[in-house]
Image: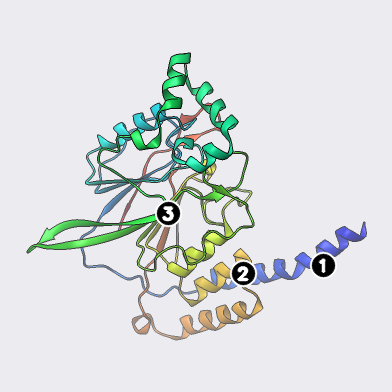
Amino acid sequence: MPPDESLNRKVRLPRHHLRTFAAGLHSRHSRPPSFSSSTKRIDVVCISDTHGTQPSIPPGDLLLHAGDLTQWGTFAEIQAQLDWLSAQPHEYKVLIAGNHDLLLDVDFQLKHPLRWKQALKASSRAPEQELINELKTAEGLDWGGVVYLQDSSTTLTFGQSDGKPERTITIYGSPLTPEHGLSAFQHPKNQDVWTSTVPANTDILLTHGPPWGHLDGIKKSGCVFLAREVARTRPLMVVYGHIHVGHGTEEMVYDTVGRAFEGIQGGWAGWGSLLKMAAGVAWGHLLPQRWRIQVHETTFVNAAVVEGWEDYKVKNEAVVITI
């Protein structure tokens, strides 16, 4: 065995053991009771990666689109998707961009004019259509009833009772994804663009790409820095797409054991966190459930509706989560 391979194996081995022990402890953890809200229940409809398609959308209170509305990111494509979303009956429609939605990333167009020109040409069936798309900018888009978020938040009010809102939901949205190819809203994989960016009062985190380890495909293509930020803020929901094969839902509880487990799996916590996990697991089995503090679950939703990377076809239905 070459020396460099032997050295690599010695470096990886402790982390491998650490993750294995952590997974074993986490599987034995008795979760604390889930927090039950007495406020108005809200049906959240989640879609992502429509890539120019317009699938059937079920009814609900809030419609979220996690980016990649289009295939090429031109004005005509984006406007068609906005018109479609605006026509939906949901009380609120909120969206972010994805790496395919080039028109919305002005910096990308300036840095990569050739790539932008290629997208304009590929999406246009006639030279005059290409010229129209080239002349129009994001400022000319008609957003209709759609709320667009780009590294920003919005607070929505649902229902009224005695003149007061029955419930408010704060959503933070960002299109950022780790670099892969030449696309919009991307950052170097080793660059931390997430730490302390998500407001602490965020109920729903809407991102284009997944956090590491959560419905991010076999290759674990999610962002570790995003996963760490989710563990810090513990929103009710994290909604995304980007990795088409990751479509689905899962739940996570970020109590002491859950946060330590996430840190170990993500690589930002060490053996000390394993000791915290062991103590938390033991305490969870000793303390009666009625004495334990209630916590809420964080629901992860990969809402990508299409399959494939070029010939996009709708495969998955929208995901509906009640919070």
Q: Which residue is mark 1?
A: 10
Q: Earlier in the sequence, mark 2 or mark 1?
A: 1
**Residue 72: where, in percent of width, then height?**
49, 30
Q: Determine the residue positioned at 41% across, 75% down.
A: 32
Type of the residue with mark 1: Lys
Q: Determine the residue positioned at 42% across, 36% down.
A: 69
Local packing at callout 3 (Cα closer than 10 Å; few below 14, some 14-19, many 20+) is some
Type of the residue with mark 2: Trp
Q: Earlier in the sequence, mark 1 or mark 3?
A: 1
Q: Earlier in the sequence, mark 3 or mark 2?
A: 3
Q: Determine the residue positioned at 40% across, 46% down.
A: 96
Which of these two is toward me, 287 or 298? 298
Q: Comparing marks 3 and 2, which lies closer to the viewer?
A: 3
Instruction: Tell me the element at label 1.
Output: helix
Q: Which mark is residue 164?
A: none
Separation of marks 1 and 3 at Cα, in angstroms: 40 Å
Quarter of the view holding residue 264 = bottom right
Instruction: Tell me the element at label 2.
Output: loop
Which of these two is toward me, 190 or 323? 190
Q: Comparing marks 1 and 3, which lies closer to the viewer?
A: 3
**Residue 18: where, in percent of width, then height?**
67, 71
Q: Is residue 313 placed above or below 4 in the rendered structure? A: above
Local packing at callout 2 (Cα closer than 10 Å; few below 14, some 14-19, many 20+) is few
**Residue 73: where, in percent of width, then height?**
46, 33
Instruction: Tell me the element at label 3.
Output: loop
- Is any atom of residue 1 visible in this view? no
Quadrant holding the N terminus: bottom right
